[in-house]
Amino acid sequence: MVCNRYRHLLWDLHSDAFEQSVVYDYVIFTSFLASTKRFVVHNNTKRNWPSLGRNVKAVLFTNSPQLADEFKIACWDVLPVEHVSKSGTPILKFMYMAIAKRYNASFIGYANSDILFTNGLTENLELLKNNSMLNNTHTMATGRRTDVANVSTDEAGSFKSLIHVSRKRGRLFRSDAEDYFFTDRSYPWDVLPDLVIGRVAYDNFILLHARMLNFSTIDFSKTVSAIHQVVDKGHMEDKWKTIENERNYNKILIKNNFRDVNYYAGTTSCLRYETRRKTNVTVLQRRQKLHKICLYTTGILSKRSNG
């Protein structure tokens, strides 16, 4: 009952973003370690994601009973973290696979726990869901983030204020750093290596992997506001506790399994499609020409394929 009242309050605040359906067409999930320094950040995210729409379900992966209770009250679903690295960092693909098994959603997305969205995210996912250009292929959608320092609880309280603070204090980040990924429910995550979140290289690799398999890759950068909450100078550092040498965990794992990986070909500017605003309507269009650095993708071939 408390959860339902909380959701109805959010729906009232963002009534323009909701439809009547309560079916979860989209699932967005994350995982993080609680810390005093990032309390406001995670509290903002806890409130923001359930406000994205009645057809969106937010899910937290955690083994913390305290976090589980806190997020359940805020209308999140909670699942256990079952596959981790030696230092306890969650492995990304197993979380996608757990979501796909539990929810019959059109799109499933991971996002870092410090990312806030507006209803532009669901509008873009709806565009992909109904677009015939993407039929008969797997889909991977992502976009660049906008860094905004010290987003307050009030500023994170509505889509309108988030857009305002993003335009006033935000800075669009590099095209080689992706903080969220949405794929179709049947996306073959099982064939990817055991990459962990919060470490370098996993984001570029999974985009490169999708491009190598000729999946539909979409850049949301121009139409989705992904607001990265910057709270200190260490915002580019690891958010997870590590054992020695695990900063390069993903790079080492990839190097051990693949040869000559061109990470530059796994940036948002190398994605085949992009979304744009035209006369107040969001459209999906194919990029006619990619930079030459995007064309060199053959190096992702598995070492095992050479016998």
Image (cartoon, rainbow, N blue to C red):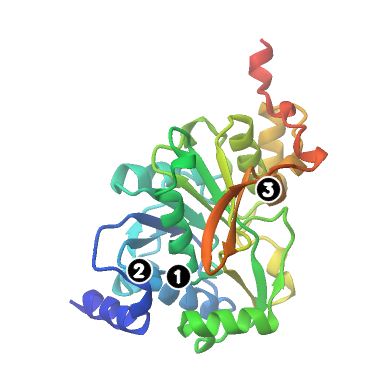
Instruction: Identify which residue, 168 or 130, lies in the foreground.
Output: 130
Q: Which element carries disc 3, helix, strand or loop? A: helix
| Residue that appears at 79% across and 43% down | 291
Residue 141 in view here: yes
Residue 21, compared with residue 151, is above or below; it is: above
Residue projecting furthest to the front: 279
Residue at the image point whose x is 71% and y is 50% from the top: 269
Q: Residue furthest top?
A: 307
What residue does disc 2 label?
Answer: 53
Q: Quadrant of the N terminus?
A: bottom left
Task: Give the vertical position of 13 relative to 107 (above or below).
Answer: below
When asked about the image quadrant of residue 56, the answer is: bottom left
Percent x, y of residue 206: 61, 41
Q: Is residue 79 left or right of residue 181?
A: left
Q: Earlier in the sequence, mark 1 or mark 2?
A: 2
**Point 25% across, 75% down: residue:** 3
Q: Amino acid at mark 1?
A: Asn
Q: In the rendered image, which quarter is residue 59 located in?
A: bottom left
Which residue is denoted by mark 3 in the rendering? 246
Give coordinates of residue 226: x percent, y percent. 58, 67
Does any portion of residue 244 appear in the rendered image?
no
Instruction: Left or right? Give the position of 296 relative to 60.
Output: right
Q: Earlier in the sequence, mark 1 or mark 3?
A: 1
Camera-side residue of 149 and 15: 15
In this rendering, the answer to whether 210 lies above or below 84 is: above
Disc 3 residue type?
Answer: Glu
Quadrant of image for the C terminus: top right
Q: What numbered label is drawn on residue 119?
A: 1
Query: Is the residue under label 3 in contact with that under label 1 (CB below 8 Å)?
Result: no
